[in-house]
Image (tube, rainbow, N blue to C red):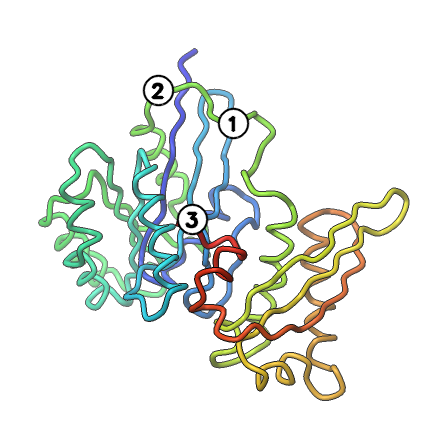
Amino acid sequence: MKIKSGFVTIIGKPNVGKSTLMNVLLKENLSIITNKPQTTRKRILGILDEENFQIIFLDTPGILKPEYLLQEKLLHFISTSINDADILIIMINLNEFESQKKIFEEEIFTKIFSDKKKTKLLVINKIDLGNEAKLKNAIKYLEDLKYFHSIIPISATENYNIDSLLDFIFEFLPEHPKYYPEDQLTDEPEKFFVAEKIREKVFELYKDEIPYSVEIEIDQFLERENRKDFISASIIVERDSQKPIILGKKGSAIKKLGELSRKSIEEFLMREVFLELFVKVKPNWRKDENMLKNFGYTN
């Protein structure tokens, strides 16, 4: 039996649905999802394994013009994931097509389109929120560019046309032995995803700049027999003024954050945990090379 195996990188502007798509393809809530843009900060690897194929999906941060050092690091994750890919899924949203088609003029895409070896699939997401005429016009425009091996309209949230997308991926997947063991879902440890689940709840509960100024550090993660796992985590903020916002009046906000985070972590780990949260101030961590390195944002 011939085995197909390869890396499929999902790229696009912030908030086009990259993480939602990967979770739907994997049927696992691996990447965190919020209604705010720029939620994904690192490359998230997820493995779809079947008897005759293995697809390694790479979810990436949204492509944007970097304004500070952290965002420059995010672009590095994107570039590395593009280089690693056998197949590129380029995602756009139907309702934002007129503005998003301009991304094809950016340097990152001119490099992609000049590489004739990589398979490029253009995915038009959120078609359930658009209309048929708009979709036809978008497909006609994209076909005329002649950049893509195929153009696939989908709705990730409605699970529409996902099987067709998988069929296209399988068609272009190279013949290769499986890269990972058959029971492996990702290459990151549980500790990484625990931090991500907490950060997801920060995005859901707090407004304005707060979620973008937060990083999560797992200080302790102890698996205990016949007892709940013990997790101690620090919520890192950039300014002293942000600490009381995270805490809330009489600690009400961080209490709610802890409750929601614990439930999400337990669903992911499929076991009970005891979670305690602290708030620490690390001034301007998003612009500090050493702190970013400690948080895993490395070149």
Q: Residue furthest top?
A: 1
**Residue pointed to by mark 2:** 175
At 36% from the left and 47% from the top, the residue drawn is: 10
Screen quadrant of the N terminus: top left
What SS does tag 3 mark?
Answer: strand
Q: Which residue is mark 3?
A: 59
Please report whichever mark, 2 or 3, sits nearer to the chain's N-terminal start: 3
Packing grade of label 2 (10 A; few <14, some 14-19, many >=20) is: few
* Residue located at (31% from left, 43% from top): 82
Amino acid at pointer 1: Tyr
Mark toward the start of the polypeptide (2 vs 1): 2
Circle 1/circle 3 CB separation < 8 Å: no
Residue type at tag 3:
Asp
- Residue 230 picture location, percent across and down: 80, 54
- Kindly report the distance in space between the C-alpha atoms of the residues bearing marks 2 and 1: 15 Å
Pick the residue in front: 91 or 228: 228
Q: Quadrant of residue 27 in the image?
A: top right
Label drawn at residue 180:
1
For residue 180, above or below residue 149: above
Local crowd size for mark 3, using a 10 Å CA cut-off: few (<14), some (14–19), many (≥20): many
Q: Position of residue 108 (x, y in %)?
A: 22, 52
- First in sequence: mark 1 or mark 3? 3
Can residue 158 be seen here? The reply is no
Q: Residue furthest left?
A: 144
